[in-house]
Amino acid sequence: MNLPVEERRQWIRSRREQRKLTKLARLRRQLMRYIALALLLFGGGSAFYRMHWYLPNGNNSNQSICIKGNFVASDQQILQALRQSIDLPLFVLNPVELENKIEHLDIIKQVFVRRYALPYPRLQVEVLEEFPWATLYLNDAPAPQFVIAQSGRLISICDFPHVYQPALRIYGRSKDSTQLNANDVNRWANWIAYIKKQTQCPVFSIDMREPHNVKVETGKFTIALGNPDSSLTPRLYRLASVLDILANEHKQPSCVNLSLNSNIPIKLATNERGKAN
């Protein structure tokens, strides 16, 4: 269909006007988006600038730091570990560094630190404390100085007087000579459980003052273990047969020496000495 020349020109002119209007509408929408984004950035920056990011000092500092999970360590001990590291804005504080500072306390096993800016700047500290395994006596002291945790960590009773002191006693010459780790504690726990099962009596103490002549004090007699190395487990397995032989003969031992591989010296409670192969 052929249109007249004037109508065709008018149709082309209207199409151009529509394209221009569409382009202007698109530019207006983009301009409004940029204005809204600029206002949002300006408002957020102003709020960020005007917000109080520092933790309060003085009496209100205890309220701005919420501590949970501490039963032995006091709030003041944990706050003292954080005191020199919280004088910075909240967004600058590194939770990992704060956790490492608190974990330097002997009783603390693991820490989780979280930061909150609203409704007011505050820190939430959740701690997990060590679980005691044995009480450590050094240099024949009448009172214990440390508590050994299940992880092998030594907890000072002087620093944490409310720590639980287990009934199991460990005697050592010095703090360095009784350094244990989690594997050592687990191994000793298995040996003690086996001795309890065979003797049917509790284990009161472990004498580690002589590293190559370790002794265990039970409720009935003493067991000389010798060197607590990898050969101790098979040497302990001989305890059951020794106790069966003594029970059949109606004799009570006062000391059983399991430190040797060839024989088992036994000291009887009646001051008689014997040997069982």
Image: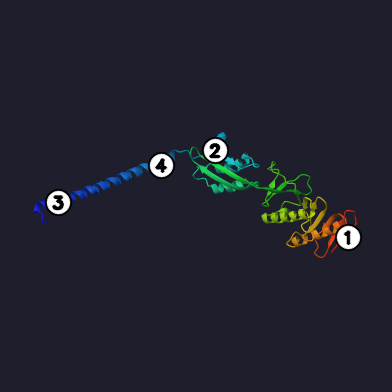
Location of residue 74 in the rendering, given as x and y in whole percent from the top left corner: 64, 40
Left/right placement of residue 154 relative to residue 94 reads right
From the top left corner, tell me how far across and down residue 91 is, in percent: 49, 44
What's the residue type where badge 1 is placed? Gly
Residue 227 in the figure: left or right of residue 8: right
For the residue carrying disc 3, how many other residues have a C-alpha within 10 Å: few (<14), some (14-19), or many (20+)?
few
Q: Name the residue under label 1.
A: 274
Alpha carbon separation for disc pair 1 and 4: 87 Å
Q: Give the label, 1 or 2, closer to the camera.
A: 1
| Residue at the spot of label 2 | 64
Residue 226 picture location, percent across and down: 79, 59
Q: Which mark is residue 8?
A: none
Which residue is under mark 4? 44
The local crowd at label 1, few if under 14, some if 14 to 19, many if 20 or more residues have their Cα within 10 Å, is few
When the figure is inspected, residue 83 is found, relative to residue 261, above or below; the finding is: above
Q: Distance between the residues labelled 1 and 2?
A: 70 Å
233 or 86: nearer the viewer:
233
Residue 208 appears in view: no
Q: What residue type is labelled 4?
A: Gly
Label 2 close to label 3 by CB (< 8 Å): no
Local secondary structure at mark 4: helix
Contact flag, marks 4 and 2 (Cβ < 8 Å): no
Question: Considering the image in quadrants, where does the N terminus appear?
Answer: bottom left
Which sits earlier in the primary sequence, circle 1 or circle 2? 2
Helix, strand or loop status at disc 1: strand
